[in-house]
Image (cartoon, helix red, strand yellow):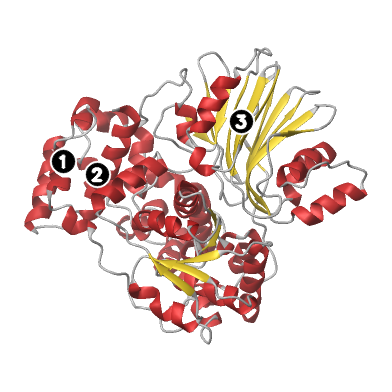
């Protein structure tokens, strides 16, 4: 667990400067406050920051085989470390250390890329093979751990856990990517296949990248697919959730974050059920008091702080803009959890994994669209599948989004449609399955799991998410559609006798009121947005004025613009 960064020269074995590696990884020292390590060989270099958690998860990295053929490092936790270690030892592998990276190192030596199928947990891994002169990078199934990379002007491949690690390299060119910004304004986050810095890429969830010296690049390849299978039994949901919590615990004694979601309460209930000691819980308000009392937790309430400070902290931790309100409260919650230890759990991602009910209307309309018997006017009223999915996802209408772009901005984006990224998912299989799998592929890694990773690591906390356990996710996707689409969440049904009554509805957000003050006016006066030339500042000023006067509620779009402006100012200002 921690931060990884490195360089690889795919053309020639050009020496790598260790000082440059240290500069890259030091920008991510918050991810690994407990130690550092580096390794270099002709044409390649790794650097690592270590977060000490439990067992060998925080052992020193990078690691190399005695003959120096293989070197490896990872960010994350291999939950089945012990079983894989025993299997490797039984096969004759000589494993010197006890850390997760040793399992990755010797597992790759034994099985090559097929190692990925055996790994369970949240991870981003990097392996160098000196014999084949290849670099192998891979990311876990659902995208819990990040990995950014870019090709530098000298041809080197640079990679790092966070964007700030790449930005520390003096050869990285900084230029904003208009399409990624348009994606962000539509989705509220930058997707997994985009970046606000042009030329920087993220290795997508469940993909690996292989770079071979002298032979160029191979496109990232998907190594895991959610397979079709037999229907899941609804009465087995609670045992499956219990098993996912147990797997995710993996020897740790985690605290728990109560951020107002029933899934958070479910995690606390199951941790309390399995523990002889009081579970340590953290919340940002009094709403979780009932859950804490029900399970007699050692409860702590932390203050969120004022919005200006919260926004500054968010921008510093996330690099790219993230507009979800959960990101604001996640940072202080993680800092509170750090007071009790380096591992915390939450129900992160459960709303996406189990959120079938919000797709009922979409699924019904999509079945009609696919039937093809509607007259043209009826099909026009229904719209496209990706547009309908975008509306159901909470995207601001495209017309409203377009209004904030200048003529030049609209010209640049004439062929770009953020909604189109859903199309590949929405035309396959049952409409409900398609919509939910689009959520898992697009929103889960880029929003929910990104918030967990950046907020947790900013505080030096490993934020574990049992609802993003791939076995549990697969089980839920195979529940009968009637259960996934029910008005009452299957989670609520499964845990009805375990949980106290939960507050109905989310607490009122202070963001709308805050945007009626100087923060809103600051968007329309942004020097950076003026210099960029892509936005219509007069139109943005009108939106701010309408919002301040109560003539319209532009909170969603204005908040996204404000977070964007602060993020771009930090990156380019």
Dot 3 or dot 2: first in sequence order is: 3
Residue 389, given in percent of the width and then of the height, sits at 40, 56
Residue lying furthest bottom in this view? 497
**Is residue 383 visible in the rendered structure shown here?**
no
Local packing at callout 2 (Cα closer than 10 Å; few below 14, some 14-19, many 20+) is many
Residue 203, given in percent of the width and then of the height, sits at 56, 38
Q: Tell me: 415 left or right of 95.
A: left
Dot 1 or dot 2: first in sequence order is: 1
Q: CA distance from mark 3 to mark 2?
A: 34 Å
In the rendered image, which residue does mark 1 sit on?
522
Of circles 3 and 2, which is in front? 3
**Image point 63% across, 18% down: which residue?**
9
In the rendered image, which residue does mark 3 sit on?
47
Dot 3 or dot 1: first in sequence order is: 3
Secondary element at tag 2: helix
Q: Tell me: 219 left or right of 85.
A: left
Marks 1,2: beta carbons within 8 A: yes
The label on residue 255 is: none
379 in relation to 237, above or below: above
Quarter occupied by residue 289: bottom left
| Picture quarter with the C terminus | top left
The label on residue 562 is: 2
Q: CA distance from mark 1 to mark 2?
A: 8 Å
């Amino acid at each position: 667990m921690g931060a990884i960064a490195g360089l690889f020269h795919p053309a020639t074995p050009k020496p790598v400067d260790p000082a440059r590696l240290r500069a890259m990884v030091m920008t991510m020292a918050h991810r690994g406050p407990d130690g550092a390590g580096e390794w270099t060989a002709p044409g390649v270099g790794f650097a690592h920051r270590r977060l000490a958690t439990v067992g060998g998860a925080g052992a020193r990295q990078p690691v190399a085989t005695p003959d120096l053929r293989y070197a490896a490092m990872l960010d994350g936790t291999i939950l089945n470390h012990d079983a894989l270690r025993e299997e490797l030892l039984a096969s004759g592998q000589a494993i010197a250390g006890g850390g997760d990276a040793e399992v990755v190192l010797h597992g790759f030596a034994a099985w090559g890329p097929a190692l990925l199928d055996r790994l369970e947990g949240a991870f981003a891994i990097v392996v160098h093979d000196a014999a084949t002169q290849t670099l192998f990078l891979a990311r876990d199934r659902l995208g819990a751990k990040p990995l950014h990379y870019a090709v530098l002007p000298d041809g080197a491949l640079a990679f790092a856990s966070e964007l700030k690690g790449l930005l520390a390299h003096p050869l990285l060119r900084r230029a904003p990517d208009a399409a990624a910004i348009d994606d962000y304004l539509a989705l509220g986050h930058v997707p997994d296949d985009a970046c606000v810095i042009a030329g920087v890429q993220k290795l997508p969830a469940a993909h690996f990248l292989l770079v071979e010296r002298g032979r160029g690049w191979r496109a990232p390849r998907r190594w895991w697919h959610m397979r079709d299978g037999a229907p899941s039994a609804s009465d087995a949901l609670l045992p499956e959730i219990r098993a996912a919590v147990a797997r995710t615990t993996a020897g740790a004694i985690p605290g728990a974050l109560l951020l107002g979601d029933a899934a958070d309460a479910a995690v606390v209930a199951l941790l309390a059920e399995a523990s002889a000691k009081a579970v340590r819980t953290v919340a940002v308000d009094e709403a979780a008091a009932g859950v804490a009392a029900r399970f007699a937790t050692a409860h702590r309430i932390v203050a969120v702080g004022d919005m200006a400070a919260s926004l500054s902290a968010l921008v510093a931790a996330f690099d790219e803009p993230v507009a979800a309100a959960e990101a604001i409260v996640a940072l202080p919650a993680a800092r509170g959890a750090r007071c009790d230890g380096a591992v915390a759990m939450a129900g992160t991602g459960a709303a996406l994994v189990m959120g079938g009910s919000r797709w009922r209307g979409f699924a019904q309309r999509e079945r009609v669209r696919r039937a093809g018997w509607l007259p043209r006017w009826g099909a026009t009223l229904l719209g496209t599948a990706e547009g309908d999915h975008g509306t159901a996802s909470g995207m601001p209408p495209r017309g409203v989004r377009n209004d904030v772009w200048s003529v030049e901005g609209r010209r640049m984006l004439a062929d770009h449609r953020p909604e189109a990224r859903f199309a590949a998912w929405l035309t396959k299989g049952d409409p409900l399955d398609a919509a939910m799998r689009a959520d898992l592929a697009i929103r889960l890694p880029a929003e929910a799991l990104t918030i967990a990773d950046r907020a947790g690591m900013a505080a030096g906390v490993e934020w574990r998410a049992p609802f993003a356990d791939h076995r549990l996710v697969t089980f839920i996707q195979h529940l009968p559609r009637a259960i996934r689409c029910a008005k009452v969440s299957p989670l609520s049904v499964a845990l009805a006798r375990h949980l106290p009554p939960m507050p109905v509805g989310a607490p009122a957000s202070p963001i709308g009121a805050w945007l009626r003050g100087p923060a809103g006016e600051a968007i329309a006066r942004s020097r950076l947005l003026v210099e960029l030339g892509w936005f219509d500042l007069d139109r943005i000023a009108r939106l701010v004025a309408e919002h301040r006067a109560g003539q319209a509620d532009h909170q969603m779009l204005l908040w996204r613009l404000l977070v964007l402006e602060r993020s771009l100012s930090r990156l380019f200002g």
